[in-house]
Image (spheres, rainbow, N blue to C red):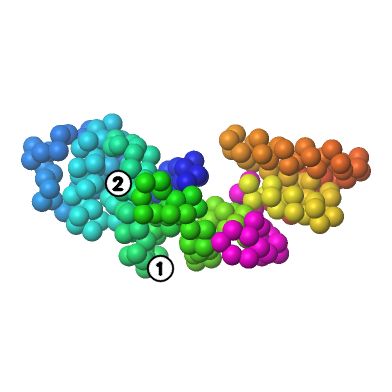
Amino acid sequence: MFKSECRSLTVLVMGVALAAAGGTVQRAYAFDINAGITKESGPFDLFKFGFKAYKNGQKEEAVEAYRYAAEKGHTGSRWALANMYAYGDGVAQDDFEAFKIYSEIASQGVEPGSEDTGFFINALLAMANYYKIGIPGSPVKADLAQARQLYFQAASAFGVPEAQFQLAKMILAGEGGKANVQQAKKWLNQARKSGHAGAMAVFGNLLFQEGQTARGLAFMTAALNKGNPKDLGWMQGLQEQAFSVATEKDRRVAVALAQDIEHGDD
């Protein structure tokens, strides 16, 4: 799975969890009765304790608290525990264990407007990522059709830009279903309007290939100023290739348009 993208969503959801856990992180104590929290405590209290322990680097206590809270049905604790297994954070990395927990979260569904929506979306994306490549040594095999369906669910029902981008790439490549350039462009256009730099670059490349030289080059140029450092390599490759074959007039127009696109005036 492309874990860097999941990290970004994880940070966002963790921010929500922090607010739910009471905002300011206090010093976490050992997981025993002296801390006022035991395995018999309520799931939200256990989650708050686990969150505070995690923020203070006491990851063994965090894992223990999350496990007890997860057993009591607390979705946020399940999500936090799954992420720890996925990244080998405080526990031995175990993608299959993470997958099983993400699956539990996804199978529960989510009510509209629920505070668990972020956890649910994160679980859908994580499962899609796993299905794209499979998990070696486990029953989870690569299943592109399933990955595509999960991305579609997150893209359509929740409007998640990363899901829209990944779905578009699969549709372009004909992975997990038929290829359809126009359908892919639709999803890329939605994602790039939300500021997704990768979608902006690929969208621009498609426009360029269709003969919209200046506009396509403008989107690829604007994407370079919005992208994460880890993505700049492939995005720069697309932009430089297009730039090298564009006319001087198209280049000048593209530079001007790119500034408008960066400010959302497109």
Q: Is residue 75 left or right of residue 164?
A: left
Mark 2 neighbour density, 10 Å: few (under 14) some (14–19) many (20 or more): many
User: Does the magenta portion include 261?
Assistant: no
Name the kind of residue labelled 1 in the image.
Pro
Q: Quadrant of the C terminus?
A: bottom right
Question: Total label count?
Answer: 2
Q: Is residue 66 left or right of residue 150?
A: left
Residue 210, picture quadrant = bottom right
Provide the residue span drawn in magenta.
Answer: 172-197
Residue 21 lies, with reference to residue 185, above or below; the image says above
* Residue at screen point 69% across, 50% down: 202
Q: Is residue 217 left or right of residue 56?
A: right
* Among the two numbered marks 1 and 2 on one chain, the one whose residue lies closer to the N terminus: 2
Name the residue beneath numbered marker 1.
112
Q: Is residue 170 left or right of residue 224?
A: left
Secondary structure under badge 2?
Answer: helix
Q: Position of residue 119 (x, y in %)?
A: 38, 55
Question: As rendered, which of 145 and 46 lies closer to the eye?
Answer: 145
* Residue at screen point 61% across, 38% down: 231
Which callout, 1 or 2, points to the residue nearer the camera? Answer: 2
Residue 117, picture quadrant = bottom left
Name the residue beneath numbered marker 2.
81
Q: What whole-number distance in Å separates the C-alpha atoms at marks 1 and 2?
A: 24 Å
Name the kind of residue labelled 2 in the image.
Leu
Q: Is residue 228 visible?
A: yes
Residue 211, picture quadrant = bottom right
Q: Residue furthest left?
A: 33
User: Does the magenta portion include 194?
Assistant: yes
* Residue at screen point 50% across, 44% down: 2
